[in-house]
Image (cartoon, rainbow, N blue to C red):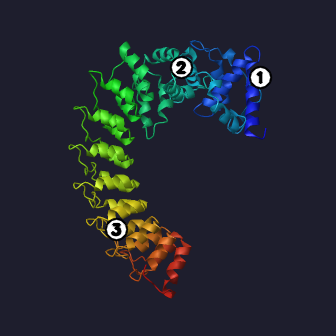
Amino acid sequence: MTGGLALGDVYGATIERIKAQDGDRSRLGMTALMWISHAERPLQADELCHALAVELGSTDFDAGNIPSMSTLVSCCQGLITVDKEASTVRLIHFTLQEYLSTHPDIFSSPRSAMADICLTYLNSKQVKAVSTAPSPDIRNAPFLKYCSVYWGVHAKREFSDCGRSLALELLKEPYGQISTKFLLAQVKNFPFWRFSTPSPFSGLHCASFFGIVEVVAGLIEMGCCNINEEGFSGGGPLAWAAHNGHEEVVKVLLAQENISPDKPDNDGRTPLSFAAENGHEGVVKMLLRREDVNPDKPDNKGLTPLAFAARNGREGVVKILLGREDVNPDKPDNDGQKTPLAFAAWYGHEGVAKILLGREDVNPDKPDNDGRTPLMHTAWEGHEGVVKILLGREEVNPDKSDNAGRTPLSFAAQHGRGEMVKILLGQGEVDPDKPDNAGQTPLSYAALCGREGVVSILLRRQEVNPNQSDNDHQTPLWYAAWAGHERVVALLQSRKAATPSTI
């Protein structure tokens, strides 16, 4: 077992021995290998055992069918092992995964088979009887979490007629609350406090979430769903399909006469907003073809689809939205804090910044309600590329103060952005020792926060006074000592012996 060919021969011979076993051992061995090699995440031992105990299509899960792990290891002829630390089951070596991946004919339609098993498990009386309490006991249904989260992932890749029937049976009624909680736990920034308020998450929501167009169409045809029904977040099925970029499902939903394509959720987010945020250009284009979709509709915080696209660096979506005359490219949120350009600057999206700055109606130096400009936001975060782009604009004042008197250099110094400090100090207009309204200079902020590198850079400037006091008569040395930054204290104390030079 040293060469790749020899190792492949060994794996092939072992798999043939597994197939040749008597009784149920062959099925257990091959099905276990299928699950371990195709599962979306490592399976716990009890999850795998429950998966192998499922009788396809049965509504009664028979616990007597659950095999022991020792039986499975034996049936797999030593090709699987249990990771004792993680309690997960894995293949004996990563080369076995490679071998199985390069021999797809070993398993027949594994994804659809796994979807069918998951759906059968979710349709069983035992699983449906699991309590919907906030912290349910799923020890007797350990496979529930995996099935809830991944049945649709498998079905999306490969779906059988049996799976379609099982899915329609499962989803013709409101989707289980526990299954929903497991499913939506993977959605970034989902407000889970809403689970405390009983709200429907229909089967159509679930099918739209996964993007399984056959099931979406089937549920609509059965007439057992409300096309605009609000789920836990107040969003309808279209919002979930748009959120996940499922173009075919979006097309089916938009074809329904009573669809509300611009309906906001509890936060004021529309399907277009979600599609823009996640960069789903095809869905964005489909929604923008509708006259009843407002391309500049803000959410409850005043964030437009363009703002979400800019914040996430979705250059393609930004270009699409800017092609609309009814989109304001410089619109701030409700608090006047950030425009699309400010978001791009804050998160360091150079491409989006360039696109926005190509518009004459975008102010590159527009302050928010706190007086902070895009340059200040990006200096704070240390995005050098965006800073250079902004500094290339004549309208941008590199030494502009916010309402508190703080400059871009002040923010960069406080947060230890050494390269940013050097870039700003290279601008002739920047005063390296400019105090804010409290009398604190960039040096005092750097000293307070222990930014040794920045302190060293600033001290090389002749204009910087290391002994300058703020309004409370505190010097940079006092701040460094008070915060316990010994190395910064030493730097400041050595300034008198140093010969300052300009950068």
For this view, does 344 lie left or right of residue 452?
left
Q: Are marks 3 and 1 in contact (CB under 8 Å)?
A: no
Image point 69% across, 15% down: which residue? Answer: 64
User: Cα distance, mark 3 to mark 1?
Assistant: 73 Å
Q: Dot 1: within a 10 Å radius of its alpha carbon, few (fewer than 14), some, or many (20 or more) residues?
A: some
Q: Nearer the viewer, mark 1 or mark 2?
A: 1
Q: Quadrant of the C terminus?
A: bottom left
Amino acid beneath label 1: Arg
| Left or right of residue 18, residue 378 in this image | left
Q: Dot 2: few (<14), some (14–19), or many (≥20) neighbours within 10 Å?
A: many
- The location of residue 113, given as percent across then percent down, is 58, 20
Horizontal and vertical percent position of residue 14:
76, 27
Amino acid carrying label 2: it is Leu
Residue 420, visible in the rendered structure = yes
Q: Quadrant of residue 67?
A: top right
| Residue 447 rendering spot, x and y as whole percentages | 47, 72
- Secondary structure of residue under mark 2: helix
> Tag 3, which secondary structure?
loop
Mark 3 / mark 1, whichever is N-terminal: 1
Circle 2 is placed at which residue position?
A: 119
Q: Which residue is mark 1?
A: 17
Q: CA distance from mark 1 to mark 2?
A: 30 Å
In this orientation, which residue lies closer to the viewer: 375 or 231?
A: 375
Identify residue for label 3.
Answer: 407
Q: Considering only vertical position in the picture, is 325 above or below 201?
A: below
